[in-house]
């Protein structure tokens, strides 16, 4: 495993981090229901592989992901991991901005000081812990002053409830603004071979503030793991059914991309996923590869991407081959 400091903090995080949206299940990740025993095994496997950094959020399974982690982090596991969760999206019906409706819950976005404090209390309770290593603002929004939001986050750092702050679904200008009122350790943003534009625009500002660029969705929720994934169908409500990759002409273009990748998987003796992950890691020096896992095998396989040194020429080849399938904007 490789490790990196999270921005200007002294938190030493594994470059591969464990994303737990999928273990929240529900209609969004509809094909697998994960229980506490499986999460314990995933955490133990992560520990063995050197992965020490977990990402979750209150809304993943509307509390389910955090609750499962809370139960599984008992028995001495908590202290082995950097635990990151998020604030701003909640289903308390206290009057934030409407965000979405899912599984019978209305989720609102609220970055007021009162709301983010309540979010932290709720997460600490669900995860049965008394501190969070990183708290990420899940959806940066302009309805409340940044000074107020960051003021509340900085106060919670002083109180020892959280150790570092991150932003997600933000723009470079948001990072500039938040940095006026404190330190942002990382930005967690969508970035992939199929949707690279937001990241490319963001990299210089992340570098300027020495913030880690934590990528989510590098494998596009599985679509970049194997050619036949794009031919799967998903029930209504499943995140994968809403992505543009299943529709023509993009689906056909992704198949062509896999044809370009195939000989490279032989050259580097690796999986398609590893090739995509090695490409992703090459795009920014201070990148963190946040990857969703519900199986130990996919976690183990992912760690192998760190051993691949993709040549500049092959990285360019992948970038070019992906262009016909790329989209400018992607909302998950
Ligand atoms: N801030 C935000 O708004 C936001 C949005 C989306 C995601 N996230 C975070 O980012 C994390 C990652 O995103 P994601 O989970 O949506 O998508 P992802 O990491 O692009 O894809 C996850 C899928 O890829 C599969 N996979 C992972 N490694 C693999 C490998 N080596 N070989 C084959 N398959 C592999 C997983 O399989 P298995 O399930 O079979 O293990 C899972 O189905 C989330 O879990 C969440 O923590 C944040």
Image (cartoon, rainbow, N blue to C red):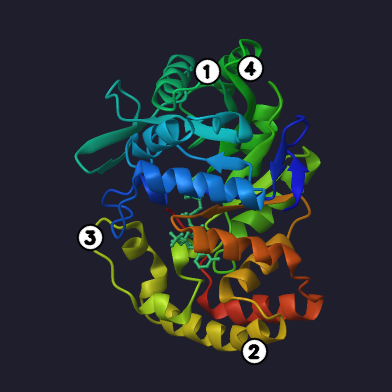
Relative vertical location of residue 30 with respect to residue 65 in this rendering, above or below:
below
Report the Cα–Cα distance between label 4 and label 2. 49 Å
Report the Cα–Cα distance between label 4 and label 3. 40 Å
Report the Cα–Cα distance between label 1 and label 4. 12 Å
> Ligand 1 closer than 8 Å to the CB at disc 1?
no
Report the Cα–Cα distance between label 1 and label 3. 37 Å
Answer few, some or many: residues within 10 Å of disc 2's Cα (few below 14, many 20 plus, some between 14 and 19): few
**Residue assigned mark 1:** 130
Q: Position of residue 89 (x, y in %)?
A: 40, 32
Q: Between residue 142 and residue 107, name the one nearer to us.
A: 107
Residue 37 badge: none
What residue sits 68% from the left and 81% below the top?
269
Report the Cα–Cα distance between label 3 and label 2. 35 Å
What residue sits 74% from the left and 80% below the top?
314
**Residue assigned mark 4:** 157
CB under 8 Å between callouts 3 and 2? no
Relative to 241, 203 lies left or right:
right
CB under 8 Å between callouts 1 and 4? no
Relative to 145, 52 lies left or right:
right
């Amino acid at each position: 495993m490789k490790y990196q400091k999270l921005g200007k903090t002294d938190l030493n995080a594994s470059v591969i981090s464990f994303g737990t949206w999928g273990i929240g299940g529900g209609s969004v990740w509809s094909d697998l229901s994960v229980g506490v025993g499986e999460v314990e095994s995933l955490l133990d496997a992560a520990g063995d592989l050197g992965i020490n950094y977990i990402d979750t959020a209150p809304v993943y399974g509307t509390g389910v992901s955090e609750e499962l982690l809370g139960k599984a982090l008992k028995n001495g596991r908590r202290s082995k991991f950097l635990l990151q969760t998020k604030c701003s999206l909640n289903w308390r019906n206290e009057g934030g901005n409407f965000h979405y409706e899912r599984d019978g819950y209305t989720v609102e976005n609220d970055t007021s000081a009162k709301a983010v404090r309540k979010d932290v209390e709720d997460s600490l309770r669900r995860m049965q812990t008394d501190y969070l290593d990183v708290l990420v603002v899940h959806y940066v929004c302009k309805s409340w002053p940044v000074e107020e939001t960051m003021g509340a986050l900085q106060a919670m750092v002083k109180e020892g409830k959280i150790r570092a702050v991150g932003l997600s679904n933000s723009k470079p200008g948001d990072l500039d603004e938040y940095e006026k009122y404190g330190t942002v350790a990382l930005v967690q943003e969508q970035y992939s071979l199929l949707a690279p534009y937001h990241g490319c625009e963001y990299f210089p500002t992340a570098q300027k503030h020495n913030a880690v660029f934590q990528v989510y969705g590098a494998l596009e929720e599985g679509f970049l793991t194997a050619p036949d994934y794009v031919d799967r169908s998903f029930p209504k409500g499943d995140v994968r059914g809403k992505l543009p990759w299943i529709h023509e002409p993009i689906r056909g273009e992704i198949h062509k991309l896999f044809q370009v990748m195939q000989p490279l998987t032989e050259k580097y003796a690796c999986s398609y996923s590893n090739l995509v992950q090695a490409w992703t890691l090459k795009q920014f020096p201070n990148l963190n590869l946040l990857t969703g896992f519900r199986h130990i095998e996919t976690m183990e396989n992912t760690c192998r991407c760190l051993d691949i040194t993709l040549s500049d020429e092959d990285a360019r080849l992948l970038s070019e081959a992906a262009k016909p399938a790329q989209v400018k904007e992607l909302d998950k």
